[in-house]
Image (cartoon, grey):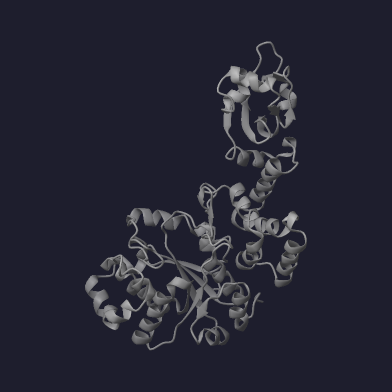
Amino acid sequence: MTATASHQLLEELRWRGLLYQHTEGASRLLAERTTSGYAGFDPSASSLHVGNLVPVMALVHLQRSGHRPVFLVGGGTGLIGDPSGKSAERALLTTEQVDENVRGIRKQLERFLDFGGTTDATSAIMVNNADWLRSLGAIEFMRDVGKHFTVNYLLQKESVKARMESGISFTEFSYMLLQAYDFLELYRRYDVRLQLGGSDQWGNITAGIELIRRTEGAEAHGVTLPLVTTASGAKFGKSESGAVYLDAQLTSPYKFYQFWVNSDDRDVGRYLRTFTLQSRSEIEELERAVQERPDRREAQYALAREMTERVHGQEALNAAEEVSGFFFGGREPSELSPAAFELLRSEAPFAEVSESEVSDPGGQGLDVLKLLTAVGLAASNGAARRLLEQGGVSVNKRKLGAADRYVPVESALLAGRHVIVSKGRREHGVVRILA
């Protein structure tokens, strides 16, 4: 049983804001037979970022409608770089860099696509065009592929025209033919008859369709997806610290969660359609909540929860919510789990010290002045003392008085032997006390 009937796939994509244009026979192809469709991804980094999720979600809906998604990683074309949507030629990656990046992507995809068994007609597969491009000879390529395209045909493509004035190398000029060859190889190897890609990929997609028609006498189709921007016109997928990655080492689950929570009211309904699998009725209810109760940010929290759980798992979601509650809500430090402290340690100044280093020799407890300097909230004991005397210091969110230099060890230690020391209301540091 599929979540979306084959003949309804394009309508589902349209409602979700995932359809920009398609070839005339794409709907017929999807309705008449189980089809393999692919989207290509440039392995320029070791992780996908949230902008990559637009074509990933298109593949998800393709699979849910009873078709096979094929995730093509450009281990061959990634050595060149696609000129589409670029104003300048990118630095070329080495073979080793590309191969390493390819290895980093597969586990992320398993959060979205069902790779299942090899005999299942709808099981996703991941392929690398390095398998056929790196061994492809120049003479063979020009004879078998280049002869099917005129220079005038290539010059009419937007990805090439947009770069003619600033200059385009022959390397990038040839990229369209390589992508067309990918489509042909996937047709031959996996009976792929559909390509999905961003709206800037239309020229590359139609070149592949043309190559399949000329060499195999077969019909293939393309579907393009809109490029996502924010309501303010900014590029989607950027935070203050840069791109938002799916790799927890590059973007922490907390920052990932907060990225979605911070969605503009004007954008959140569109993001729910594009990036989640919530039903039409659920999304429309959340959109009404945005209009009627915008202060509660119900839609943003629903979006953040689904995306964080999908990408990082339930435990990471729980930790991200706990840390968010600590920073922005009323969650007490004593309520934080060990997983939340692991996450908090990457979001606030952190120090790991032995108990003897920060304890009072007289046995009165942990020395708050030493805790402040350990995490860099004070430059010296003297500066820490002045903060304490001014009433600007808290331990585990309990405000201290001028005489409260020492706190009992038993009451101060939280999960994992952590202590949270704060300067004012917004600057927090985490100290792990080693026994």
Look at 73% across and 17% down and name the residue there. Answer: 403
In this picture, residue 96 sits left or right of residue 298: left
Is 227 situated above or below 211?
Answer: above
* Whether residue 422 is situated above or below residue 25 in the rendered picture: above
**Can the viewer see residue 341 in this picture?**
yes
Residue 183, position as x, y percentages in the image? 40, 76
Residue 203 lies in quadrant: bottom left
Q: Quadrant of the N terminus?
A: bottom right
Q: Is residue 355 visible?
A: no
Q: Is residue 183 left or right of residue 434?
A: left
Location of residue 174 by image quarter: bottom left
**Residue 29, x across and y down, in percent:** 52, 85
**Going by the picture, which residue comes out furthest to the left?**
139
Q: Residue at x 58, y 28 (%)?
A: 375
- Pick whichever, 282 or 378, lies toward us: 378
Q: Position of residue 7 (x, y in %)?
A: 61, 84
Residue farthest to the right?
A: 292
On screen, residue 203 versus residue 109, left or right, reads: left
